[in-house]
Image (cartoon, rainbow, N blue to C red):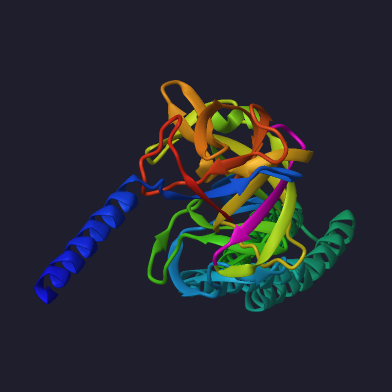
Amino acid sequence: MRKALLLGSFAVLAVAAVWVTYARKTAPPEVAFTKVRRERLVSNLVTNGKVEPLEWVAVRAERSGLVEKVLVERGARVARGTPLIELSAREAEAELASAVSRVEQAKAELDTMSQGGRAAERAEIDGELDKVRLELSAARANCDSLKRLAAKQAATGQEVKDAEEQVRRLESQARALENKRTALVAAEDRRAAAARLKEAEAAVRLARRTLELSVVRAPIDGAVYELTVQRGAYLNPGDPVANIGRAEKVRVSVYVDEPELGRVAKGMPVSIGWDALPQQRWQGTVEKLPTEIVAVGTRQVGEVVCIIENPGLELLPGTNINAEVRSQVVENALTIPKEALRREGSQVGVLVLRGERVAWQPLVLGASSVTRTEVKSGLSDGDAVALPSEHALTNGSAVKPAFQ
């Protein structure tokens, strides 16, 4: 009897276990659902880009030379006139010293000429000239005396001729000495000396300018967003040194994928984020739409130019940023999570709850944010849509809804 009862109990338990297993297998799966809701939907286009200065100047070397010092770093904020680099100035300093010496020499030559020549030469000529003039005065007096005596038959005609010849000889010597004195400072010599002075003074100005150009300075206030030189490099005139840009406002090139370009229009608000300062955002607007499609890595994008306010100067030129273009704002939009969307063939839709089953419902979508999308037609207020599930659901599948 007891054995029969035990066997009966085991049989009941076995049947119950089979029934529970069957019931579990045949019970509808529990699926998460969310209800359609109305809200203000901000449609943002999320992408990336790069910061560039709105106003910038390329700084270039104006003379050749070896870079001795680099005085700033990339990202440094500088005022106009701030030294950026220094070139070797030894040759320029030597040339300046030589040019100054030539100026002093030319000035000394002109001073000498303005005084009639070198003092020793002038003194020698003046001494000879004084002697000749004294002899000439005596010779003229003697000639006059002989002429008076000859008139009285007290002197011969030959004596008079000899006296006159002596006067002419001494007059010729005096003129020669006077010409020699004048020749010490000829007009051509003065012009040549003046030319040498001008040339030396020009060499001084050039050497000083070369020394000035040995220090390359910032031409404007701004940020050094590109620095292309290193200590020890040799620069030629025109070689790039740095790029400096004003940073109160910056230009941001935002890379928008080709299929998304239709969502962007001039004047749309733009918000910029930078991973280095994650708590901060910068605001601006779309300034210019792209004129061509370019390859950026594996993407085909258009470069949308945005102007961004940067009053604190934290956003540095050359920075890679994240951008959100607010392409549309829809008030009181009927929205669902993007994760609820499914695709069947060419249609996009959702599985909507109808009683205890789901039904496939194609949708017409509108604007979208990062996580939600607007439903323009296909759903109504209060509808519930299935969220992704580990269970394979199709049109008409029975479900046990779990609302979130």
Closer to the camera in the image, 99 or 215? 215
Q: Quadrant of residue 231?
A: bottom left
Q: Is residue 104 left or right of residue 360?
A: right
Closer to the camera in the image, 106 or 169? 106
Question: Residue 288, how many percent across, how many down?
Answer: 69, 34
Which residue appears at 24% of the width and 60% of the height? 17
Relative to 10, say whether 161 is above or below: above
Which residue appears at 74% of the width and 68% of the height? 312
Which residue appears at 65% of the width and 76% of the height? 124
Relative to 269, say whether 62 is above or below: below
If the image is split into quadrants, where does the C terminus sit?
bottom right
Q: Is residue 269 in the magenta section? A: yes
Q: Would residue 238 be visible to someone looking at this image?
A: yes
Question: Residue 266, how many percent across, how many down?
Answer: 74, 33
> How many marks overall?
0
In the image as oriented, which residue stretches furthest toward the left?
3
Which residue appears at 48% of the width and 52% of the height? 239
Relative to 299, say whether 96 is above or below: below
In the image as oriented, which residue stretches furthest toward the top?
346
In the image as oriented, which residue stretches furthest toward the front?
1
Question: Residue 163, how many percent across, how many down?
Answer: 74, 59
What residue range appears in magenta? 264-275
If the image is split into quadrants, where does the N terminus sit?
bottom left
Closer to the camera in the image, 234 or 287? 287
Q: Is residue 145 left or right of residue 194?
A: right
Question: Residue 247, how many percent across, how many down?
Answer: 70, 59
Q: Quadrant of residue 127?
A: bottom right
Q: Would residue 199 be visible to someone looking at this image?
A: no
Q: Is residue 217 in the magenta section? A: no
